[in-house]
Image (tube, coloured by chain):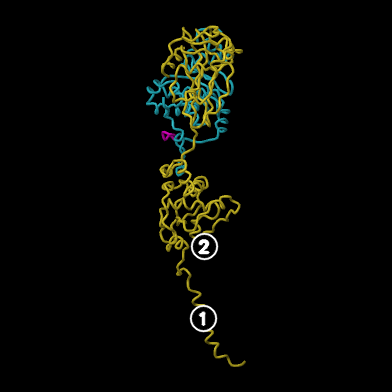
């Protein structure tokens, strides 16, 4: 699948108007990552999730637009979709993106994240997928490994259940086992 | 007392006339405004697209002096041209009002690097609108610093980069964002090949001209180059049916630019991957039969210049595995059903 992501047009700086624009002319703000980090350090979890969702929804909307809407996004190959979304995430300076499949579970990896906040990344990934595909997807931060944050993509109910596992200290592998019907 | 010099009355009359003339009001004298010369000497400026809108922070120009001629260029252009002056010295608007005693230019900043870095030739100066305040640094000065150099040198740079003037005239500056990489590896549910390689050979950096890996269609026979040795950590939870074999094959290999592992070397086929098996139809090479939930997916990425790594790793396979989803929607349906 040929990618439609054009990095040269991902961010445009309109100096006369003092504006930074995305490829769909959405206005952006270029701010230091430290500002976001400061915010996530101070804000409660709900607000961090909300912030991540707002960013993720913006990224997902651009992906969906290029792929022909949410229908086009869901019909896209995994590689094709990832290519588009990873480009947006990279252009936003939020990190690199990858996908891992563990059985039927889908795990999104965020490498070199600008903001290493679990709630923020969960909101970002969940909202990006949800906005792009039109499905009710949620993300739960499972672990950090090798500089990558691993987030499980799940339904709302499963996400709540997995959050409980994480809070109980269940390991990454054990959570995947449980999701596939096993008893860790 | 001697007799008065006969020239004294004449001198007194002359002195009286001088006093009378000196007492006449100065307001009647016209003010010669400096901008007249500047405006007359300035050539018609080339329109600068970025100046069409003007800086949002520029204050509205004040009324020009009665004798000042209207500027020959639109104010917006003038603002852009004038901005460099605000970096290293008094703003040009004040310079144009140099004859007005009420306006005193601020002291120049000789230490400013921009003062020496940006110079506008006299023949390129453009009359500027009157302004009581210098343009703010945040928008106008910075912008002008870019644009003034862009008159010639940046155009040449853009031409070298193949951008042409179309983008430059777009009144926007395109951010230079490196093309992200896309090192997508195959998704191998049910089709995973035998995992027979152990040490991961360092992959040389792909040349910048290499085709994007993601754009190349994936072919099955490419998948059997699977990186490897995670076996020491791998456990087999046995809850997920079939064999989990994280597979990540850089699609850039299709271009043939990446070195391949030696297929003929039997040493490479030794069982460093015990616990990680093959998929449907794959030759059973040291398959122990269960998913390794805690094992990290083995991801082999292609390091292309300036490209982020996007990878897809598959960690499932086997006869009991569901049919490989062909699209993101199918995969999400499977995932959300968990």
Q: Residues within 10 Å of mark 1 (few under 14, many from 20)?
A: few
Q: Nearer the viewer, mark 2 or mark 1?
A: 2
Q: Position of residue B146 (x, y in %)?
A: 50, 46
The tint chain B carries is yellow
Residue at image point 57% right, 33% down? A34
Q: Nearer the viewer, residue B211 or B144?
A: B211
Which element type, helix, strand or loop, lies under badge 1? helix
Looking at the rendering, the stretch of residues picked out in magenta corresponds to A22-27
Q: Position of residue A73 (x, y in %)?
A: 40, 23
Q: Residue B73, relative to residue A106: is it above or below?
A: below
- The chain coloured cyan is A
Q: Is residue A24 covered in magenta?
A: yes
Asked if the stretch drawn in magenta spans residue B125, the answer is no
User: What predominant SS class does the magenta segment belong to?
Assistant: loop
- What number is the disc on residue B16? 1
Q: Which is nearer the eye, A142 or A84? A: A84
Residue indicated by mark 2: B101
Q: How many marks?
A: 2
**In terms of secondary structure, where does tag 2 sit?**
loop
Image quarter hosting the C terminus of chain A:
top right
């Amino acid at each position: 699948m040929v990618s439609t992501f054009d990095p040269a047009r991902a961010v445009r700086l309109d100096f006369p108007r003092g504006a930074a624009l995305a490829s769909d002319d959405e206005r952006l703000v270029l701010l230091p990552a430290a500002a976001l980090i400061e915010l996530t350090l101070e804000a409660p979890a709900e607000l961090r999730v909300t912030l991540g969702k707002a960013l993720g929804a913006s990224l997902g909307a651009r992906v969906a637009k290029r792929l022909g809407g949410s229908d086009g996004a869901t019909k896209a190959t995994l590689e094709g979709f990832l290519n588009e979304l990873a480009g947006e995430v990279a252009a936003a300076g939020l990190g690199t993106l990858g996908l891992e499949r563990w059985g039927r579970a889908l795990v999104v990896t965020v490498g070199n994240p600008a903001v290493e906040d679990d709630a923020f990344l969960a909101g970002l990934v969940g909202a990006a997928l949800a906005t792009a595909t039109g499905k009710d997807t949620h993300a739960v931060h499972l672990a950090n490994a090798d500089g990558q944050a691993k987030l499980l993509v799940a339904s709302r109910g499963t996400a709540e259940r997995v959050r409980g596992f994480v809070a109980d200290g269940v390991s990454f592998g054990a959570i995947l086992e449980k999701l596939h019907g096993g008893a860790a | 007392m001697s007799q008065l010099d006969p020239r004294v009355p004449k001198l007194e009359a002359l002195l009286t006339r001088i006093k009378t003339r000196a007492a006449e009001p100065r307001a009647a004298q016209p003010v010669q405004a400096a901008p007249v010369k500047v405006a007359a000497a300035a050539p018609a400026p080339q329109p600068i697209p970025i100046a069409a809108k003007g800086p949002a922070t520029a204050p509205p120009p004040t009324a020009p002096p009665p004798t000042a001629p209207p500027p020959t260029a639109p104010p917006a252009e003038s603002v852009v041209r004038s901005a460099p002056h605000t970096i290293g010295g008094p703003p040009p608007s004040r310079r144009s009002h140099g004859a007005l005693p009420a306006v005193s230019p601020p002291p120049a900043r000789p230490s400013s690097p921009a003062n020496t870095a940006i110079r506008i030739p006299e023949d390129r100066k453009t009359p500027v609108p009157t302004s009581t305040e210098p343009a703010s640094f945040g928008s106008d000065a910075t912008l002008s610093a870019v644009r003034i150099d862009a008159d010639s040198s940046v155009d040449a740079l853009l031409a070298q980069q193949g951008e042409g003037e179309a983008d430059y005239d777009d009144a926007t500056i395109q951010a230079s964002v490196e093309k992200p990489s896309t090192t997508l590896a195959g998704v191998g549910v049910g089709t995973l090949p035998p995992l027979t390689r152990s040490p991961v050979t360092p992959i040389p950096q792909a040349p910048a001209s290499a085709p994007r890996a993601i754009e190349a269609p994936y072919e099955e026979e490419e998948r059997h180059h699977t990186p490897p040795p995670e076996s020491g950590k791998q456990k087999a939870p046995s809850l997920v049916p079939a064999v989990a074999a994280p597979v990540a094959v850089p699609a850039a290999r299709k271009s043939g630019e990446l070195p391949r592992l030696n297929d003929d070397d039997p040493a490479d086929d030794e069982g460093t991957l015990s616990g990680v098996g093959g998929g449907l139809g794959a030759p059973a090479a040291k398959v122990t039969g269960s998913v390794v939930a805690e094992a990290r997916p083995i991801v082999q990425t292609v390091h292309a210049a300036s490209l982020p790594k996007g990878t897809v790793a598959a960690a499932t396979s086997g006869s009991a595995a569901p049919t490989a989803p062909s699209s993101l929607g199918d995969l999400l349906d499977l995932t959300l059903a968990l």
